[in-house]
Image (cartoon, helix red, strand yellow):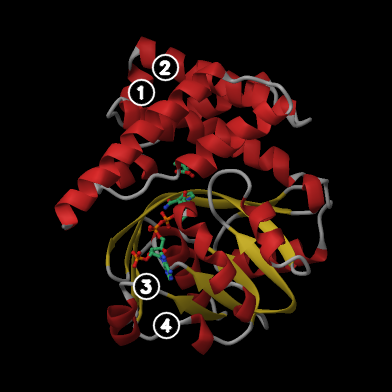
Amino acid sequence: MSERKYAIVGTGALGGYYGAKLQKAGSDVHFLLKRDYGKVSQDGLLVESKDGNFTLPQVNAYSDVAKMPKCDVVIVALKTTQNHLLPKLLPSIVKNDGIVLALQNGLGVEEEIAEILPKVHIIGGLCFLCSNKVGAGHIHHLDYGQIILGEYAHGYSSMGITDRMQQIAHDFQAAGISIELVEDLLLGRWKKLVWNIPYNGLSVVLNARTDELMADTYTRTLVEQLMYEVKAGAISMGRNLPDSFIQTMLDYTVKMKPYRTSMKIDYDECRPLEVEAIVGNPLRKAQEVGVNLPQINCLYHQLKFLDGRNRIGQLTVDS
Ligand SMILES: NC(=O)C1=CN([C@@H]2O[C@H](COP(=O)(O)OP(=O)(O)OC[C@H]3O[C@@H](n4cnc5c(N)ncnc54)[C@H](OP(=O)(O)O)[C@@H]3O)[C@@H](O)[C@H]2O)C=CC1
Ligand SMILES: CC(C)(CO)C(=O)C(=O)O
């Protein structure tokens, strides 16, 4: 059993899934919730998974970080649209010499955390997971689950494989979660964007699932062109990814069960979209060094329009 105390900041589709798996395997896990606090503190968590369903009738649930213990590893599992809350949520729950593990999609989260907590260790994780929160404390794990871990250092310089990464990998592997350790977190993030930028973006703009995007010649071409622009973005930051990786991502998606991306689900539910973290930040990073990514730029502006209109719609519905 792990000696490390874990905090899950954001007990949704991803945080609820990995946190529940860690607790099931014997780790000491503390879950921060918002709307689901009442239900989860009463009834715990239910994970419906293709690998087998399980329930945790009792979990350490909190609605306020002031009541949480200091933890060795704090897992950030909010949507990036809520990252403006991190300065309030993180400082009191990370031990001195503790680790913040950012499991969000997109680019730039480690830099945001380093500004809030310059002294803690920061590890980024790229999660290849298909999971949805279908009710309060009710997680539906559809597929996959592997995490690629890399440690952050200022300017995304490579840290190699650290003991801290190995310790976390040990706990996750004991919980049945597959882990790969990488020396270069920035390269890992750009590789994940090869998938997220085209599929998350186009699924919203074109109102399509992954299988539909891959079945049509025109949209498949668009996906591939966007992937090559992500590669150009990576190169602008001194990282290269082989063309064979793009082919692997295309093949991977063809083999995936038809999937409504998380950005599409957010759009359909009129929730804010993770446009800035997934599309805006990579675009700006490339622009800062004079590299224009015209198709990603076009996608960004389309998504901003749809996101803005959705939010106005939501205000009208709420008022
Ligand atoms: N789901 C997946 O399969 C994958 C997700 N990711 C990434 O993981 C990140 C998390 O996504 P996901 O889990 O799907 O999102 P969810 O919306 O399912 O989970 C986020 C959770 O954070 C909670 N939350 C929001 N604000 C607060 C707050 N102030 N205090 C406590 N809890 C709060 C939300 O609670 P409430 O509902 O009450 O607002 C929600 O349960 C994203 O960056 C996503 O892109 C990456 C790969 C796969
Ligand atoms: C690529 C996918 C769907 C699962 O591997 C994922 O991780 C995501 O939605 O970000």
Tell me what residue is drawn at x 38 percent, y 86 percent.
58
Badge 3 vs badge 1, beta-carbon distance below 8 Å:
no
Badge 1 vs badge 2, beta-carbon distance below 8 Å:
yes
Q: Earlier in the sequence, mark 3 or mark 2?
A: 3
Bin the neighbour count of mark 3 within 10 Å (Cα to Cα): few under 14, some 14-19, many 20 and up: few
Marks 4/2: CA distance? 44 Å
| The label number, if any, that marks residue 220 in the structure image | 2
Bin the neighbour count of mark 1 within 10 Å (Cα to Cα): few under 14, some 14-19, many 20 and up: many
Which quadrant would the N terminus be assigned to in this image? bottom right
Marks 3/1: CA distance? 35 Å
Q: Is residue 54 above or below residue 157?
A: below
Q: Can the viewer see residue 5?
A: no
Marks 4/1: CA distance? 40 Å
Give the residue number, with chain letter if any, for mark 3. Answer: 34
Residue type at mark 1?
Leu
Give the residue number, with chain letter if any, for mark 4. Answer: 61
Residue type at mark 2?
Arg
Tell me what residue is drawn at x 43 percent, y 27 percent.
301
Q: Earlier in the sequence, mark 3 or mark 1?
A: 3
Task: Point out the frontmost of discs 4 and 1.
Answer: 4
Q: Position of residue 148 (x, y in %)?
A: 64, 50
Q: Can the viewer see residue 297?
A: yes
Marks 3/2: CA distance? 39 Å
Which quadrant would the C terminus be assigned to in this image? bottom left
| The label number, if any, that marks residue 213 in the structure image | 1
Badge 3 vs badge 4, beta-carbon distance below 8 Å:
no
